[in-house]
Image (cartoon, grey):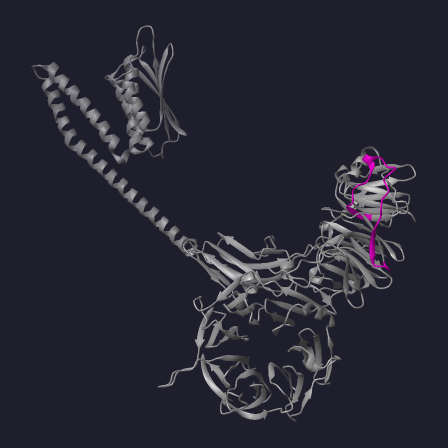
Amino acid sequence: MLSETSFANDGFRFRYIDLPNALREGNIKDLEIDRHGLLWISTSRGLHRYDGNRLLTFDLVSQPAIINIAITRLYADRSDNLWVGTQSGITKFNLKNWTTTQINQKSKPGQPARSLFVKEFYEAKDGTIYTGSNDAKIYRIEKDQLILVADLGKINPNSAGLSSIDMIREMEGEQLLVSCNGRLVTLKKENGAFAVDHYYPMPEIEGQIGKEVFYHPSGKAIFYVEGRGVYTLNLHTHKVALLPYAAKDSVAAEDRAYLFPLPNNQVGIFFNNRGFFSYDVNNAAAAAYAPGLVDYFKNIRVRYIRENKGKLYFGFHKGIAEVQQVHSPFENALGTPSIETSPLSIRSIYRHPDGMFYIGSYKDGFSRLDERTGERQILSKKIVYTSLPWTKDRLLLATEGDGLQWFDVKEQKLFPLVIDTTNVPFDKRMHNRYLICLARENDSMVWVGSYFGVYLLNVKTGVSQNIFSGAAGEILHQSKVYDILIHGNKRYFATLEGIFTYTPENGKLIRLFEDTDPAYAGGDFYCIEPVAQEFWAGTNGRGILVFDEQGKVLREINVNNGLAGNAVYTLIKQGEEVIVGTDQGLSLINIRDKHIRNYTRLDHLPSNEFNHSAFMTYQDRIFLGTLNGITSFTIKDLKAYKPADTLLVSLCFTDFTTGTKSTLLHDFTMPYHPSSAIEINPEVQYFSLRFGGVDNAIEQLHYYYRLTDETAWQEIGRQHEMSFVGLAPGDYKLELAALLPGEKEYKAIMSIALIVNPAYYQTWWFRSLVLIALLGLGWLIFRYRMQEVIREQQLRTKIAGDLHDEVGSSLTRIYFQADRLSTQTGDAASLQKIAASSKDALSTMSDMVWSIDSRFDTAADLVSRIKDHLMNLQNDLDLTCSLTLRGDYAARSLSQMVRQNFFLIFKEAVNNAARYASEPHMKITLAFEEQILLQVSNAYDAGKVKMKNYQGGQGLHHMQLRTEKMKGTLTVDVQEHEYSVCLRVPA
């Protein structure tokens, strides 16, 4: 998380980057900012990357590892490589593939290699990387190898005969400007190496020049000499001059200086404890630069300055500060400049005509601020909620815990206002000393709002009056009163129990909205302001409640119709505008057209939340107290200010995490592949994307994301991570956006393509193969079944043929032989029995052959068989049969099982009917519809014949078993004169 304190002074914002404790507890040695705004920091524990969310550390045993933790220099090039210089070599950190390569001097035959002690890195315009060592050698790094291009060991050695390269810069014409042991040298290119062109001994300068050297295209070098000041050197004329700058003190008395680039080829100069200056090289003119910033460096000692995308980063022992030039309508003061201390929450503001501000705050109590010098003096530790001017040099102060206080401007002292309660009954005396608001009734009377009600006080006599009675008075007496408005003949009290009105003429006190809008009657109200013919009241959670003089609610103004926040602490009417201080920023409402403009910390407010009653106006300027100092502005400046249409936030994806059943992997190369699509492999069960950066605006936004243009935005609030589980395969466009307070249109920040690859079983080709395989399997099963059916039919036909041919021929011979013998003399009766049995056997065999022969698996064959059987039955027995047929059966097929069992049940039923009928007549109905119906009926005399439920012992039982095989139903209906059997079989 980044906590920051913002200030705008002369167009600059200063803030501390609140680094993790792991960094602040160490000794920060060097800082580098890569192309994407992420911080790379070296400490005594190694190398660190900080992205605003997560701290990554690299050392000798990390993955990847660096060559040494004794880091001397960090440098990020334009190709997303981080060069880590140490006391024993170089680590090239390829940020795109997250690998490191160790680079060092190679040993020679018979001579061990000496480790490279790195002092400087520099990237030329053509992308060549140069490094300088502590033994005055300059190397070009080519294909991860050191190539010596210059040896300046004999130039300007120290007393021990040693030299070092402290700075390398590129000049025109393939020349290099280097600092060698405290003096400047120009090098010219010769045969792939560099030779000395000019050496600048500069004998007129005592001491060595520092690493901060600025080269100007005009041929001038600007540099700092320890304890001496800032000088310029004309490389053409060799002339050295002390830099003139706008300070009365001598240069030699200044603290250490640091140089940094400014727009238009100007040079910025920062002196510890002294401030900033700018130097125009072309005009040789120096001037004070951002004078208000120096106060924020009083408690820190800068060790280095880095510049990135117009921002300056100041490194010190325990942290990093950022300075950025901004365009803002707000002038801010008294913001907390230290990350170790709490912000200055402003409770009250008053500006005296002499230019002095008198301010109440929780942190410092009551203090005085000089508008001209910025000097502040604490006058009392009492917490002042409201400052009410009583006379020119006297203020009446409402305090928290110390009652009412007089403040004498001339004497600069506070005196308690003693309240006389001798004539007031004991139970009515006001012992509450926690006061919030004041409203002057006349020259001697003042309304005092407290933690427990409101009372009227005579400041001259000190006599207080609690003049309210009744139910409304009891509620008001227990209420915390935040604001008092005197308007016409009424007094309005904004409290945590609603809004009360009091009419002095009749002494009537009422609580508004109880009869008309009960939902608003007991709400929390912080402030009230007359606007045209209406009253606007600031609420806690409903925004602004607008009502008329009769107490009728007219409308609400809240975040749904454009307000910055729903908790409103301050309302100020200024001409046709109303300034609204909320918990989510500042709103400017035009009374005429109701247009609302919102301003937040993104517009360089010191805080998004304002304090109740902490405001004042002076001429056309408005002063507001916030949770972090004071901000001031004019309506004219607010209207003229045009924020950017898009959010200019230095934000990037920082971490791509994937989780499978067994592993959790992190990809930290996301910032360095901004346009590449992310591919999710099928085995990934969970993945998340983190985003971050150290930009001031990142922590101020509410974030949303979506995966397609058609889907709704998903809110993640202030979280910096998006997690996904079980995302369906497909191509997505992950978009990140923010929604500013009071706005309904999402502002896009960044996007990235997201490809979720399907598992093999989710691909179209796999599904096609499965479908083809299922179809093929179904076809094979069908072919197999058909072959089985054909084999079964062939077998049945063969069995039927064999039965008919073999058994039938034998029985036929027996029958004819017996029949011939019966005509001869002898035992004719026995022979007749043999013939009859043979005939029955032939009939039974014929039925069996018919039932299993596949050629007869049709309904038409079944009907034909039934007709044959009935005809034979009529010929053999003295009875008549009537057959009724219904339905189409000519082309209807039947299975062998149904045909066989159906026919056997039919035979059993007609045989029973023939045997037990009381009359020689039966009726048979056969219907082929949704079901196959068979009904056999015969006359039945219950008094003479007792029906037996068997044929051959178990007649009906076997009929039921055969019916179950066909999944049909068999019912027997016995009436007084009729007996019927009904069979129903599914078609």
In the rendered image, residue 63, in percent from the top left (x then y), is placed at: 44, 66
Residue 889 lies left or right of residue 417; in this view the side is: left
Residue 606 in sight in this render: yes
Q: Is residue 800 above or below residue 91?
A: above
**Would you place residue 358 above or below residue 419 in this image?**
below
In the image, is residue 236 above or below residue 512? below
User: Does the segment drawn in magenta span residue 327?
Assistant: no
Looking at the rendering, which quadrant does residue 318 occupy? bottom right
Quarter of the image for the N terminus: give it.
bottom right
Q: Is residue 917 left or right of residue 499?
A: left
Q: What residue appears at the point 31 percent right and 22 percent down from the top-left corner?
A: 960
Residue situated in front as seen by the camera: 980 or 697: 697
Quarter location, residue 683: bottom left
Judged from this view, the residue extending furthest toward the top is 943
Residue at the spot x=51%, y=64% of the render? 56
| Residue at the extreme left of the image, as rendered | 826
- Image coords of residue 825 (percent x, y): 7, 15
**Left or right: where 101 falls relative to 717:** left
Range of magenta residues = 409-437
Most common SS among magenta residues = loop
Residue 884: percent from left, percent from top: 37, 22
Magenta segment: does it hold 426?
yes
